[in-house]
Image: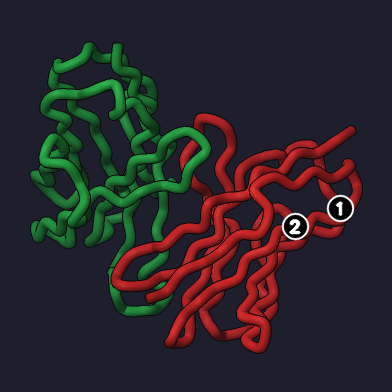
Amino acid sequence: DAMVIQNPRYQVTQFGKPVTLSCSQTLNHNVMYWYQQKSSQAPKLLFHYYDKDFNNEADTPDNFQSRRPNTSFCFLDIRSPGLGDAAMYLCATSRETGTGGAADTQYFGPGTRLTVL
Amino acid sequence: AQSVTQLGSHVSVSEGALVLLRCNYSSSVPPYLFWYVQYPNQGLQLLLKYTSAATLVKGINGFEAEFKKSETSFHLTKPSAHMSDAAEYFCAVFGAQKLVFGQGTRLTINP
């Protein structure tokens, strides 16, 4: 089945220790997104890639960075995690973005829950 | 700018009862609307989407939603609740090249 895969599902890191979260997709979609979701809140978009073009949200902290080495993979790097970065991180994909049509539908992975000690 | 408002952060119904989760949208253009469900420690799963083809949209797991332009609403319903429906539900609208989510409604099912 075509899908969005996130690894690991649970990640524990120490305060200030860099961490990388991974997302891969078999949908061959152009767009890949990273969201942060804190407890009992809606997902918050951090950034997205359209192919190799990176689009950062204005309020995403510099501590968060991303890499997309190829169509299938996208990584979220947190350079110096703080206690406030503990959250669920969701990866999503869509075929297109901004067309206003069915191609904009986003498909989500299962998420990685990050704990910062 | 497009936005959605979900009325009620918590909804509790008895097993077998009607489920009604409310969502109102604000959009200056014909909206593109979604309902997603999130089970504990899981990602978001698409329940259904409104693409302007039909005002009554049927989704997975017996859910459906009706787009009412006059009321700017896109409420989610299911005729008979099941214990497995307990989850968080998010309404979303596509705007400014991104999904804009409501704050979510936590649905509890009482046996």
- Does the residue at mark 2 contact the one at mark 1 (Cβ under 8 Å)? yes
| A60 to the left or right of B61 | left
Is A52 situated above or below A84? below
The location of residue B39, given as percent across then percent down, is 59, 37
Number of numbered markers: 2
Which of the chains bears the disc numbered 2?
A: B
Q: Colour of chain B?
A: red
- Tell me the quarter of the picture where residue B84 sits: top right
Is A14 situated above or below B45? above
Residue type, numbered disc 1:
Ser
| B89 to the left or right of A65 | right
Q: Residue at x 64, y 79 (%)?
A: B67
Packing grade of label 2 (10 A; few <14, some 14-19, many >=20) is: few
Could you say whether the residue bearing mark 1 is in a helix, strand or loop? loop
Q: Colour of chain A?
A: green
Residue type, numbered disc 2:
Gly
- The residue that disc 2 covers is B62
Q: Residue at x 33, y 24 (%)?
A: A114
- The residue that disc 1 covers is B80
